[in-house]
Image (tube, grey):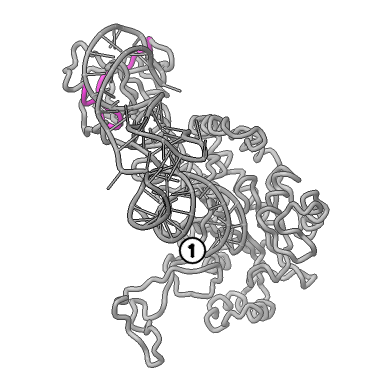
Amino acid sequence: MKRLKVLDVLTNQPIGEEVLVCGWIRTFRNNQFAALNDGSTIKTLQLVVDRETTDEALLKRITTGAAIRAAGTIVESQGRGQSVEMHVRDIKVVGDSDPEKYPLQPKRHSLEFLREIAHLRFRTSTFSAIFRIRHAAAFAIHEFFNKRGFVYIHSPIITGSDAEGAGEMFQVTTLDLDNVPKNEEGKVDFKKDFFNKATNLTVSGQLEAELGALALSDVYTFGPTFRAENSNTSRHLAEFWMIEPEIAFADIHDDMDLAEDMLKYVIKYVMDNCGDDLEFLEQRLVNEEKQKPQNERSPMPLREKLAFCLEEDYERLTYTEAINILMNSKPNKKKKFQFVIEEWGADLQSEHERYLVEKHFKKPVILTGYPKEIKAFYMRLNDDDKTVAAMDILFPGIGEIVGGSQREERLDVLQSRMKDFDIPEHEMEWFLDTRRFGTCPHAGFGLGFERLVMFVTGMTNIRDVIPFPRFPGSAEF
RNA sequence: GCUUCCAUAGCUCAGCUGGUUAGAGCAUCUGACUGUUAAUCAGAGGGUCCAAGGUUCAAGUCCUUGUGGGAGCGCCA
């Protein structure tokens, strides 16, 4: 007999048919009713075991966490709470689970506790929902770009370029750290290393994506990214996944349109395909927030918040406009901000971004035209010579979700900008070649995938939306 | 890296200005019940009070240091 997934049984309801299901027991009530989950859906299939005819020793082995293979007939449920259930004819315990030792028992567990047993947390309703949604979001991203004719580029994970300037890098080496070869100057001799040079894990695939875009027109990368920064927050990881589209013959406005369209596409896809999981996570949030005071609770339930982000156009404004709003804001005048905005040119802190998104506009915001001093060298210099064509998309609750820009396509301007930032030209010749030969206006952005998953699931700690989070001091599992 | 809070049973927590045998709910186990669904009822077991020092007649409680965790900030996606 072919195994059916629980999702198929619950969707198709093959009443009267004998089927085979496999999965793990969530609870076993009354020595009679087992809730079986196989990860295909957040829902469980109720297995009704005949306790008169089933061996008592076998009944004792049907415990929370046990792996089960059960054959029986699907019938309309006699009880409330589910429409169909299985009358079990034959049940086998494939893998036992000692209830005295198994850490997941049918009760609420804290996210902090589950983080410590990340190898088992897939088995909880919350995390199975999160990772199904994570999958759906990843799939939707590929689908979105594919429909628009983008080419998926695999940018290198090990990079020999050390001028990307996006943060501290992890070194990659096969040198014996107990006996490091030195050159004549007494420095590490990387000529003896695996690649004959110093190499690192990538902090961004953007520069490589630009190379692709200047031939294939529209490309994107979607891969792991590594930052060796000592960041200890609920929004940062040392290893995370990033999506970096790059579009040729395009300006900053095309870039903003693309980012907004993509975010909306992914959110809609998840809403259309993960309804049960979203409903569960929404209820989870409501229950969690019951303990909080009214003013700290979310203004909208999860699904309403997502729908709101689909209907609304994101508020687009310049850095200069944002500074004016902030300078005239109540918290700024009453010096409630930790960093009071006093003049144009100030870097925006997260408290300022949060004010704009959560208090002032109450919807996603796209900020453009930042002062050139506070942004990267490759961003296109505007005609005012003071600002660059950068854009950041800010989301309620999680802050910056997208950072992008129109790229500086003019060779001379780019070279002078690199000089300003002390970036050695000789290491970037390959990058400058794109400006020497057939350069054209182009733009792109980086989307933090985990931050998107946080937003869509309503989770508030980034360590709960990636299976095995890496952060300073921790690379477990 | 900085600021701040926390660490007591398998889990979530209570434990008052330091005072005799450290508690509850859930989970687990035993029994009863049997169409349950946070099952119910009765009972039982379960503790290096994070670690090491210190103060004190007396420390789960106070102090110091360390370790682990949360939240916020910075860096960013």
Tell me the element at label 1. loop
* Residue at point 53%, 67% (across, down): A167
The residue segment tinted magenta is A60-78
Q: How many marks?
A: 1
Residue A290 in the image: state x and y as whole percent: 57, 30
Q: Pointer 1 indicates a residue of which chain?
A: A
Side (left or right) of A99 relative to A76: left
Q: Residue furthest bottom?
A: A184
Side (left or right) of B15 relative to A59: right
* Residue at point 54%, 71% (across, down): A164
* Residue at point 74%, 51% (across, down): A336
* Residue at point 65%, 53% (across, down): A393
| Residue A144 seen in render | no
Side (left or right) of A102 relative to A246: left
Residue A371 in the image: state x and y as whole percent: 73, 67
Side (left or right) of A171 relative to A383: left
Q: Is residue A61 magenta?
A: yes
Is A363 rendered above or below residue A168?
above
Residue A112, quarter of picture: top left
Three-letter amino acid code of the residue under disc 1: Arg
| Residue A48 seen in render | yes
Looking at the rendered image, the quarter that the N terminus of chain A falls into is top left
Residue A475, quarter of picture: bottom left
Residue A133 in the image: state x and y as whole percent: 48, 40
Residue A410 in the image: state x and y as whole percent: 68, 75
Q: Is residue A51 magenta?
A: no
Is A351 rendered above or below residue A68?
below
Residue labelled with disc 1:
A227
How many other residues sit within 10 Å of disc 1, few (<14), some (14-19) or many (≥20)? many
